[in-house]
Image (cartoon, rainbow, N blue to C red):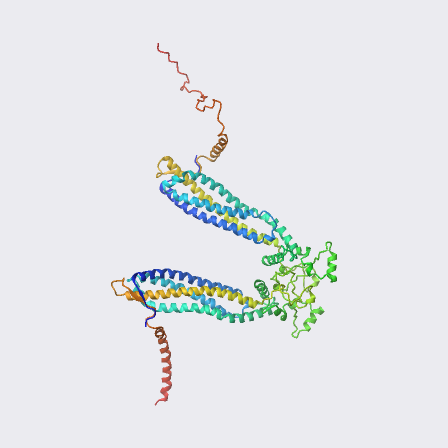
Amino acid sequence: MVVMKMKFPFQKRVKLAQGLWLLSWCATLAGAITFALGCILKTELRRRAEVMDNSDIHVVPNTLMIVGLASLGINYFASKICQDALDAGRFPRWKNMLKPYFAISCFFTVLMLLAVIMSYVMKGNLESSLKVGLRNGIRFYKDTDTPGRCFQKQNIDRLQMEFQCCGNNDFRDWFEVQWISNRYLDFSTKEVKDRIKSNVDGRYLLDGVPFSCCNPSSPRPCIQYQLTNNSAHYNYEYQTEELNIYLRGCREALVNYYMGLMNTIGAGVLSVFLLQGSVLVSLRFLQTSMEAVAGNENTEIETEGYLLEKSVKDTVMEYVGPLMTFFLLTNQVEEGATGAPAGP
Amino acid sequence: MAVFRLTFTKTKRDKLAQVLWILNWISVVTGIILFSLGLFLKVEINKRGELMAERNIQYVPNMLIAVGLIACAINFLGGKICYDCVDTTKFLRWKLIMLPYILCTFFFTFCVLVGALMCYSMHGELEESLNLGLTEAIRFYKDTDTPGRCFLKQTVDMLQIQFKCCGNNGYKDWFQIQWISNRYLDMSQKEVVDRLRSNVQGKYLMDGVPFSCCNINSPRPCIQQQITNNSAHFHYEHQTEELNLWMKGCRQALLEYYTHILQSIGLSVLIAWLFELSVLTGVRYLQTSLENGLRQGDLNSESDGWLLEQSFMETARVNLNIIKSLGKCNQIDTANNGDPNINIPCTSKANYGPDNVPPKEIPEAS
């Protein structure tokens, strides 16, 4: 049972070869674009690496870069093959290479699709990585004198101003952490001593946020300290106040940003995937129709082209079969070995 | 004495024409680049239009845009002319236009040079405009309820954050104006009333700055209020503290930014000017060599090309005379009853040979 049989007269074959040559060069360009998109995504992820706990999400841009490079090679060979296809003298030299070529090409094309699927699936992973990373960032905000954490304050401030967000889930995360270092607290004042005593762990907690949480769109000067104390500020009600500081949490802001980026890239990669798929299908049709011509003196006869010689199931068994027999054989040998001592 | 005379064979002329055709098209691209640079400068100036007072700074980008468009048009025409110069019949079509075209392009290159120089001279006007504009903006920072000034606070805050600057000359500018609106001041508190009374004009002045002046690189949380009071903060000395707030003034920051842009644009325009001048020189040589070939009667032979037919002084003198006589073209000489065909008596002495002896009169034959 042949899959997708089609008739190809000579003119149609010629047109197919020409169209395929053009299509393969477009696909080469698309492969380069995929590589570039992968690089862009990786750069963006690395820029905020300090607020991410692990780099599991980097598998998406890495895969895109590998697939982009591979598709450059695949499409270059595709253009070479279709250039030689119409020449009966040069086509036979590709005969041995075509089967592995198609196997590798299909593998990388499927990998492209997997990369797009992964970018959606890994949203949860990204979110938990950001949660832990931001929590640590906020906790070590005050440690500007500890080596390895000197720039944590700078990074968090810049992040909050750029993404217009405050804290991990929201601004209340700053109330639970001592973000003013002991170096700048005057322990001789009663106020400081009282506050530290009132806390179980001896931390200086206050209902205030750093200046980077301030919203420039607010009509009044920024209120950073005593946020929950309505009487401390004139004409101020923190329950209804929306413009004073950023209300969004940085985790939500970053996840939205990266998901938006991956959606855009995913749409581009999907179209590249379709293009690559069409190149491979056309090449397969060209190959099979040219193989039917081989041996005939008249190269202008009408031939048939197909996608797969046997049905899909049979083809899969053909490739996977050897692997299965290899595994089964090893099992049988083991059984035989264990069975032998049990024999006489 | 021709200026920079060169001899051109037919093949050399044709090659020159082809090269000039390509160079003219590159010049069209250069014109487009000039146009886009002018547009970029205009957009950048308009983006911060609220922070600049009314001054004549729009003329620089407008000039660049105009110069870019005219350069495209002139070089497009030049490309067509050079393309046709290879063919004799087509050249005759352009023969009369070529000299005026070269003159126009020569004056146009002056405009390009003026455009480049203007980029460098805009500095003073820009500084004054920014100074006045920023002073006004800081003064109206608190007026977020006045229509027309609602977004000035946001603009100034974003400016200070983006350009890492504070105030006009420095952060002390904020001490001299009231930047907290009366709407947010509790007039019932003694402290507020005291402060207002202590000021002559009744303004609420304080030694504090808005949050946008805070320096991200500071190791300690930002000190915005009571900046000059060392005892108000633990372990703090405002005279030596440099990392707490941005030290640079916004006028200087913006000026540096715009100067950088203008210098890059000025350099590009100068390079474009040099390129235009070289293309113009090539077209002049082509024109003179073709015209000399026509004068000789045979366009396929060798001919000379030059920049000017006579020396500079001679050419200037001749042109001045032409311009003077243009003014006199309507006046007819009425000395000889308006008849221009009457012989003007020769005023020079006749030359009768080396002895200078007039010939004897031949006696009439009897």
Q: Residue drawn 53% across and 70% down?
A: A127
Q: Of all residues shown, which one is farthest toward the bottom? A: A344
- All told, the count of numbered labels is 0
Point 66% across, 75% down: residue = A200
In what quadrant of the picture does the N terminus of chain A appear? bottom left
Residue A117 visible, this orientation: yes
Q: In the image shown, does B41 or B284 lie closer to the viewer?
A: B41
Residue A139's x, y, as percent?
A: 60, 70
Rendering quarter of residue A294: bottom left
Residue B14: x and y in percent read: 37, 43
Picture quarter with the C terminus of chain A: bottom left
For this orientation, the residue located farthest to the top is B366
The residue lying toward the viewer, choosing from B67 and B314, is: B67
Q: Is residue B88 left or right of residue A118?
A: left
Residue B66's place in the image compared with A148, above or below, is above
- Residue A39 coordinates in the image, percent (x, y): 47, 63
Residue lying at the far left of the rendered structure: A297
| Residue closer to the observer: B339 or A92 | B339
Q: Can residue B7 be seen in this view?
A: no
x%, y% of residue B54? 61, 49
